[in-house]
Image: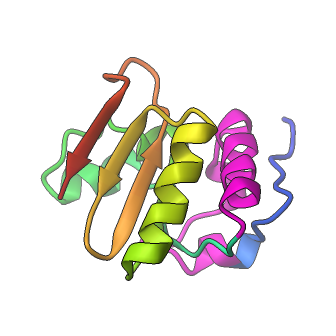
Amino acid sequence: MKKISSKYFQEIEFMRCIPACSLQNMDQEFMNRLDQLREEAGIPLVLNCAYRSYKWEKSKGRSGKGDHPQGKAADLRCRDSATRYKILRAAFKVRFTRIGVSDTFIHVGMGKDLPEEVVWMY
């Protein structure tokens, strides 16, 4: 099995997520795009959440069919409008097509068999 890698994100950052996970749970194409987002935004990105198992999702009353169980999503900490703008501008530029906006994070995802070109509010 090929080892998943990232230019900017370290294993410890995934272990700090809620729930804790591993860089190795992630999809390589997603990580490449997340690295591009980081370069384009020009700011450090803090992971609140990345991979969440199907079981975890179901335990929270979710379908388990979203971006996170596929290893194709991250919730990026964002607590001010300037940071939110930089992340969103970069996310559109690097072609993330599934974006969720909260007052404390931005979800970027590219899950398989899910609606694309969507932005939602939490």
Residue at image location 51% in from the left, 74% down from the top: 17
Residue 88, percent across and down? 47, 54
In the rendered image, the quadrant that contains the C terminus is bottom left
The image shows residue 16, relative to residue 98, as above or below, that is below
Tell me if 78 is positioned left or right of 3 in this view.
left
Residue 30, percent across and down? 64, 40
The image shows residue 42, relative to residue 71, as above or below, that is below
Query: Does residue 74 appear anywhere in the picture?
Result: no
Classify residue 113 by image quadrant.
top left
Tell me if 50 is positioned left or right of 104 in this view.
right
Residue at image location 45% in from the left, 63% down from the top: 85
In the rendered image, the quadrant that contains the N terminus is top right
What range of the chain is rendered magenta? 13-42
19 and 42: which one is in front? 42
Tell me if 26 is positioned left or right of 112 in this view.
right
Classify residue 8 by image quadrant.
bottom right
Query: Does residue 89 appear anywhere in the picture?
Result: yes
Residue 105, percent across and down? 37, 69
Residue at far left of view: 61
Majority secondary structure in the magenta region = helix
